Image (cartoon, rainbow, N blue to C red):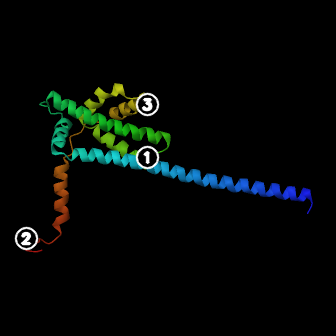
Amino acid sequence: MTLAELAAFGNFIGGLAICVSFIFLALQLRQANRNQRSLMQHGRSTRTRDVFMRFGDPAVTALVLRAFEADPTLSDAEYFAFYSLAGAIFMNYEDSFRQFRAGTLDRESWESDRRTLEWLLTSPGYRAAWRALRESIGDDYRQFLDTLMANTPVRPLRHHAALLRQYIAEETAGEPQRSTMET
């Protein structure tokens, strides 16, 4: 084998190594993108879980229900407590809004969050909280929520306690009644 043939063979091997490196790099980038999306989804679910856990406090729930129904007997402290909670919720969804626009949150997750925002904005209490909070929010998210609110009518509160009672009754209707003596 001549020196020229050896050099050509070396160039071929070098080119092949570069191609393999590019393929490996593409696979690493794809995995990094999946990991990033997974982290964003985990953060979203953690924030949402924390909100639900906060609503598990009966005092918070009572306050939110009263604010949701626009109870005029709320004290100043109760109004501010609701404003703070509503503000945290709107800011939570602002994060999802920004992640979706950046491409790190999938469409299905964002659509779920958008529907939740729409549902919240059926309440006079959340609408008022948004109006009070909106000036401290970035232009694009503010414009999105203003448009969503303009297109969302105020509706009566859907009472989840009554709904859960109904669903439990429906789920247990077909089951035989167990006596308290059974173990």
Vertically, is 106 above or below 87? below
Q: How many labels does the image show?
A: 3
Residue receiving disc 2: 180
Front residue of this view, candidates 81 and 142: 81
Amino acid tagged 2: Thr
Which is closer to the viewer, label 1 or label 2?
Answer: 1
Q: How far apart are marks 3 and 2 (CA)?
A: 58 Å
Q: Which residue lies furthest to the top in this view?
A: 135
Number of the label disc, if any, that sits on residue 140: 3
Percent coordinates x, y for residue 105 in the rendering:
45, 46
Sequence-first disc among 3 and 2: 3
Is any part of residue 113 visible from this angle?
Answer: yes
Amino acid tagged 3: Asp
Residue receiving disc 1: 40
Sequence-first disc among 1 and 3: 1
Name the residue located 17 percent from the left edge and 70 percent from the top edge: 175
Q: Which residue lies furthest to the right in this view?
A: 2
Label 1 environment density (alpha carbons within 10 Å; few <14, some 14–19, many ≥20): some
